[in-house]
Amino acid sequence: MNDAPPSHQIRAAFDAKAITVYQAYSERIAAPVLQAGTFVTPFKRTRMTWIKPSFLWMVYRCGWATKPDQERVLAIDITREGFEWALAHACLSHFDSTRFPSEAAWQEALQTSPVRVQWDPERDLQLNSLPHRAIQVGLSGEAVDRYVDDWITSIRDVTPLVHEIHAAVVTGDSDTARSLLPAEQAYPLPDHLIDRIGRH
């Protein structure tokens, strides 16, 4: 019996109303965001902002909150309706001949879609790549405005948790590290969204 996850599957912490995504920022951006409960200056809405439902992919990307300008890891709870709106308006960041008749058609969709979806290898506790992939969702234009103004229900700083898990990993205490990870499950999606984002 094969218990391995499908190659492309959204796994996340979520409940009936909200899903948790992660972003990492500098202290300069994170501090006012945490105080305001949403994204405020110096955060720039004009830049594409990438949200990541996978905790381990986030810590891989920010190097356990040690990379420059990624020292603070934020957990952002957003409405499931908002998250699914993003997926419904997304374009894959790579050409997929099963979903686009030509590269030109894909390029046109990429330029006009306010959301991009990218699949990258999921990571284990040692940040090694795994055979299955984790989703990143890039928001721009209208999607960023909806994210900042409408979707966010709470923001919390999980940097201390990142450091605690990393310390357990460094000392070889994988059981403790694993027990501290957010509980992520397969996120249920209707077929039309699965088709849209390229889940297999």
Image (tube, rainbow, N blue to C red):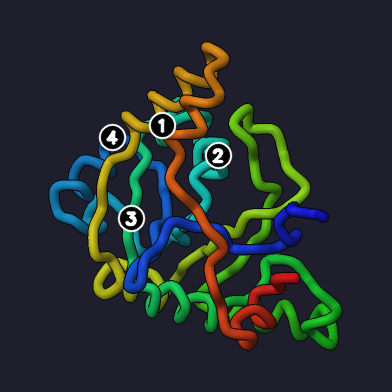
Q: Give amino acid for label 3.
A: Ile
Label 2 to label 3, Cα distance in Å?
Answer: 17 Å
Q: Quadrant of the C terminus?
A: bottom right
Q: Quadrant of the N terminus?
A: bottom right
Residue matched to label 3: 76
Residue drawn 49% across the image and 53% down it: 184
Instruction: Reply above or below: 103 against 52.
Output: below
Res. 27 mark: 4
Viewer-side label of 1, 2: 1
Res. 61 mark: 2
Residue drawn 47% across the image and 78% down it: 84
Characterize the local packing of mark 4: few (<14), some (14-19) or many (20 or more) Cα atoms within 10 angstroms. Answer: some
Q: Secondary structure at mark 3?
A: strand
Viewer-side label of 2, 4: 2
Label 1 to label 2, Cα distance in Å?
Answer: 12 Å
Q: Give amino acid for label 1.
A: Val
Instruction: Reply above or below: 163 against 31.
Output: above
Instruction: Reply above or below: 180 against 171.
Output: below
Residue matched to label 1: 162
Q: Give amino acid for label 4.
A: Glu
Left or right: 173 in relation to 141:
right
